[in-house]
Each structure stands twice: as structure tokens, then as C-alpha cells.
Image: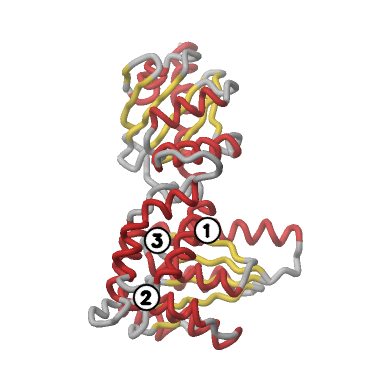
Amino acid sequence: MKIYHLSHTDLDGYACQYVLDFYFKNCYFYNSNYGKEINENFNVIFKNIEENLKENPNEEFVILITDLNLTLSQCEDFQKAIEGKKIKLLLLDHHQSGLECMQKYPWYFLDDKRCATKIVYDFFSRCYGENKSLSEFVDVVNAVDIWLSEDKNFELGKVLLGMVSGAKEINRVMFAQENIKYLFHLFDVCRKYIHQKNAHISLDNDLHSLKKSFFKKENDDTLSNLISKFVVERLSINKEKFSVFYKGSKGLLTSNIGNTSVIGNDFLMQNPDFDFFVDLSSRKTLSFRANNKIDVSLMAKNLVNGGGHKNASGGLFVAYKDSSNYDFIKAQFIDLIKSKELKENNENKS
């Protein structure tokens, strides 16, 4: 049996997955905000299930959704999708806005007196056994998520809440699994503070070093440099997945990677088989970088009426629709290139 777990992108959402990872090691984690991201992730999950069924037609699946309330139309679509298949669907949530869905669908569980992490822990601990240390961590998450301001764990929970909301070091669209591992690492070390005096202050003081401990391998460096090195390494390992082509030149496409000048230049220096580097942001901006192999100012001008310098240019991709799924993002950029190539070919023929 394989478990596909879709959860929210905040402390409570990731902590739900942390709890599930404690009990099961055959889980595939996905994270989503509300709205269309839920549908995008659900479609990706089903695509992966179909691929798994090709290899093992007898495989059984569980789709667990936590800390996300669905609309009635989403519930109806998901219900139809699982009918007749060896798929069990379970939603564990605490948002009162999901009450109407809970009343209609038996797989939709709602309890607004506990955070989603506590609901998940209570559910699986009854089946597979309690764990004191994990339960204490869950109580910290619960205290801040449902805002129990008089609870002894509340202040520590506030630090964890800020820690997760500020954990932008690893891009969750480009490196979803690495982002999960990073947050799980932070949860692991945070649990050691729970019984300390003034735990919230100690954790707040140590957080910078705790973040560095995930990225540091041999030599110490600034957190920024360690992150850049990590990102370039991951991009290099997965470069074929992220590769795109423009007029015979090979490039790498990222999404909201940040620090584009440093990361783009470092990647091109370490991967001479690539000619250009492009980052597409949620604001629809395109940042082009090169290392004297291609004039990206001409590329930016041709694709989006942008411009700049030979090795550093930019532009606005007006028609771009932001997504939490890299494949959807890449498909739009490839379509942009193809549409420009088609237009040029038609103009040359005429």
C-alpha cells in the first residue's frame, strides 16, 4: 500500500506530514495552498498512481488530505475520481468552513477543537501506538495553531510558526522533497528544546545555526553561500529535468529560485553543457543569465519584448499563469518558445 499525503503549506500542514512520516515510510508528500493548487496536486497524485498501476496492477493506495478544507465541487470531483478504484480517500481537517462537505462525504472528518496535526496524531497513535516525545511536539503545534495563548507551549509554538513561514531557503516547487526533509530536520531539532527553560528564547537564538546544520557538509560558510551551493548542486543533479532549448542552445529553467545572478552564474560555470539560465517568477518576470555563449538580451527581446545586457537580461511574460507544479510552469515556457518560432517561420515563408 502506498500513501499519498496532500497537506497545507504552514506549520500545521507540514507537521501533519511529520507525524505521518513517523508511522509510515512509504509516503509521498505534496503541499498546497487553497484553490487551484489543490486540484493541480490531486491531478499529479492521480497521474503518479496511474504510473504505479502500470508496474503493479494490484497495488492499493491511500490519499490523505490534511489541514485543507475542500469545496463541495472539489469533493464531488475527487469522489468520482476514486470510484471503482483501489483508492481510499481520507481528509482530516479542523476548519469550520468544511462543515457542509463533512456532512455529505463519509471520508471527510472535521473537528474544530484540535489542529490538524493533533487530529492526525490522535488518529494514527490509536492505531499504531503513542509516542511521548512526538505527542509533546504535537501539543506545541496545537497550542499556536488554534491560538491557546494561555497554554505553556504557546510561545514556543509562535517561534515554530515563524520558523516555517520564513523557511524559504529551499524552493518547494523545484525541490519539494528536499523542502520536506529540511522542515523535518528543523522539527527534529526543535523537539529537543521543549523541556528547556525559556525554550522559545533559546530556540529563537539558535535558529540560524540550526538552519546551517542542514546545509553544512564540510567547510563552514555563511548561510546564504551554503544555500546557494546546495541549490546549484540540486539543479546540477536534476538538470535534464529542468532543461529547455532555444534556437539550438540549451538552457535551464527555474521558478522563483531567488538570487538569480549568483545561482545562475554558478550553475553555468559548473555545467558548461548549458548555454543559458532562466528564472520565471510568480510576478511573471523572466530573468535571463548567460556566460558568453548566447546573447540573452536578444533572447529576452524575441520572447517577451524584454532586454538588458548580453549576459543578464529580463522581461515580462504577460500570459504566464502561476502554478505550484513545475511541469505546468515549464510547459508554458516551452509553448512561448514554440509560438515565437512558429511566428518567425510563417514570416519567413511570406
Q: Quick check: 248 above or below 72?
A: above
Q: Earlier in the sequence, mark 3 or mark 2?
A: 3
The residue at the far left in this view is 149
Q: Residue at x 53, y 67 (%)?
A: 5
Q: Nearer the viewer, residue 6 or 259?
A: 259
Label 1's element?
helix
Judging depth in this view, the residue of 350 and 105 nearest the camera is 105
The first of marks 3 and 1 along the sequence is 3
Task: Tell which tag, 3 or 1, sits nearer the viewer.
Answer: 3
In which quarter of the view is residue 201 placed?
A: bottom left
Label 2 residue SS: helix
Disc 1: which residue:
43
The kind of residue on which mark 3 rests is Thr
Residue 218, given in percent of the width and then of the height, sits at: 55, 41
The circle on residue 140 is 2
Labels 2 & 1 near each other (Cβ < 8 A)? no
